[in-house]
Amino acid sequence: MSISSDNLLDKETKSSVVQDESGAIGGAFNREELYSRLGNTDNENAKIARSARPGNSNYSWSLENGEQNSNQTIRSSNVSFKRGSGLCGLMNPNRICFMNCVVQCLAHCPPLADYFLDDYYLQELNVTNPRGTKGEMARTFGKLLKNMWSGEYKYLLARDFKMHAEKFTNQYDPFQQEFDAQEFLTFVLDNLHEDLNRAKEHKGGITIETEGRPDPELAKETWDVYLKRNDSIIVDLFHGLLRSKLICPNCETVSVKFDPMCFLSLPLPVDKEKVFKILYVPYDQTKNETRFEVKASESSRVQDLLVKLSALIGCETDRLALAAVSNHHIHKFFSKHDSLEVVNVAYRGGLHVYDIPEHHHAPSTVIPVYHWEVKSVDTSVAGNNRMTSFHPCLFGTPSLITLPTTECHYQTIHRLVASKLSRYIRIDNSNINDNNCLRSEDDMDIDSENESDKEPREEAFTLYVVNTKDASSAKKIPNNGQLIKFPEYQGDQCLVLQWTTTSIRKYFKSQTPQQDSSLLTLENKTRKLNLQDCLDIFASTEKLESGNTWNCPSCKKPSVGGTKKFDVWTLPNVLIINLKRFSYIVNRHDKLNKKVDYPLENLKLNDYLVNKNHPSVSYNLIGVINHYGGPSEGHYTAFAKNRVDNEWYCFDDSNIHKLKEKDVVTSTAYVLLYMRNDLMKEENQS
């Protein structure tokens, strides 16, 4: 039962929530109804009745903490569960941070936590629901929460919960790949709902006539039908209602339907221009590498980007070449006619711009240059023998240099390379003339002819020619007095400087790129984004793309295009907001890392409610799921407000630390959990 505000066009109409004649809101309960559902019989004090399942006082389970005796058990009773601080970390033995952050946020949702901690869930286990897990997910979740809130453990390994989650993920195995925390939260809530579903009817749906009916009437009927199949603590707490409106482009019929929501998925504004982060590698060795940020539309060309960059650098556009670089290797040079959309796909590692001067005096060729260090690895073999293998490891910034295509000796090439890479190499000053330039090639040739008469010099590096598509093709340039000639076109060939660990320490100069002022300027010019901006986009009317076809119920024709609009009809008691940072377009994953300012208290959504009879509601933030990293990998943490000391904490797997309120709002926020103010007040009184 995955429910969100996405993809509602293709779903069967399921539910609606309306204000009935008595003024009560159906579906999303008010605080009296909610706490009554949890067993409260004293609305004045709004205390949750904490009783165990009748006749099951010996119900027990094994602890999940590996530090404790596996035979130790906790037994439920007809008294309230004695709580600790709730500050219990969760171990991450195998990339399960996505699971840990979901558990922490749910464990710090007071109504849901009370429902499990005080064993009320045991009265509502539905072990016959074919859509559920026969109560297994609910039981293991309840056990885990009790251990986390017992106050006995600094951290736990949620072994049983992970095992059951793996067992019931039929279509995929989230634990064998980097998994999305929002999807896992959906999975957990869906399974808890089915395990705790009070409804006995699970078959089929009733077709509801929607055309021409008032919204309140349609909403009430669809909600009643929905409750016949879906009635649980998850529905009580997390489900609200969305209204979707479609306008047919053929007959202009307005189609309205209602769907339950468990998440409010909010899009982030997408800039028409993208910021490209670029490392500029100047040809002039007296200048440092510099980082720039340039804004440009993805629909423009590489030439347009280089024009903007050349204005910042102060050099001619024709001298600049844009390359995709990662792992110290140039993967691709872009044509100046390439679209920046192509560049955006290729530059996951980084973008470098190289300054390539024109040479008018002597024939020359441009060749990429890499640095690698050969490291030895000892491998044990049969007997007492050992085998040593050598593996080249790239390091440093790839460069482009010009070399003469005329014949010259090895020593001449070696000195030229050292001079043209003096930004990275401590060169021998004896090879530099009074004008701080490399001595003439004629002088070097004379030196080369007399090399045999001199003591051999220690070389900082050895030169190799390598085919970039096959590192095993490396051929050492011979230093035997023969003349060497580089062809004008190198194709896939490059020059490699092979270093030893000792020579790196002695001769290689590490670089820290300078930061251009454009980085700070762009950051300051970026307008701050807040949650209201995302809500405005969500509530706006969207023109459907030509590829989005749907069947109009009035003209019975496939409708291409048209407009759609989502509106909030009823808000839930606990509102989960998903910031849609991730996208997938044309075989490309992307992530928006913009910071969205969101309130910690008194979030009001009245302006986005189309049900004008809905009472005024405000929310306080109780949890945040954060994602660090890129679109295909990263790390999750959780922020949660602790009900014991009313402080914010960061839960980073087994590590926990207190947060200042000013640090709760970050650019990594992915999922936000808000609870209604009035429920929070009642919870504090209980």
Image (spheres, rainbow, N blue to C red):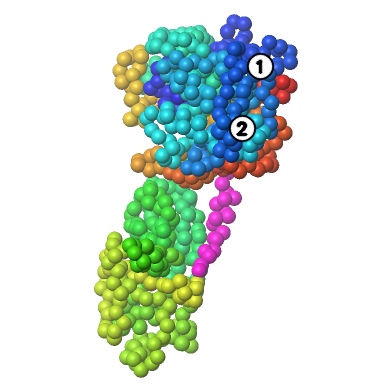
Q: Could you tell whether 596 is left or right of 484 in the image?
A: right
Q: Residue at x 59, y 50 (%)?
A: 524
Residue 252, given in percent of the width and then of the height, sits at: 39, 18
Q: Which mark is residue 40?
A: none
Q: Which residues are magenta?
A: 510-534
Q: Is residue 532 magenta?
A: yes
Which residue is label 2 attached to? 148
Residue found at the very far front of the displayed protein: 383
Residue identified by numbered label 1:
78
Quadrant in which the N terminus is drawn: top left
Q: Residue 112 in the image: state x and y as whole percent.
A: 60, 23
Amino acid on which disc 1 is placed: Asn
How far apart in space, not on screen, are marks 2 and 1 (Cα)? 20 Å
Question: Going by the image, does 68 lie left or right of 174?
Answer: right
Q: Quick one: label 2, few (<14), some, or many (20+) residues within 10 Å?
A: many
In front here: 215 or 428?
428
In the rendered image, the vertical position of residue 16 relative to residue 430, given as above or below: above
Q: Position of residue 89 (x, y in %)?
A: 60, 39
Is residue 406 toward the left or the right of residue 87 in the image?
left
Q: Residues within 10 Å of mark 1 (few under 14, many from 20)?
A: some
In this image, 581 relative to 358: left or right? right
What residue is rendered at 47% in x and 42% in y?
Answer: 94
Residue 541 visible? The answer is no
Mark 2 or mark 1: name the one nearer the start of the chain.
1
Callout 2 amino acid = Met
* Quarter residue 382 falls in: bottom left
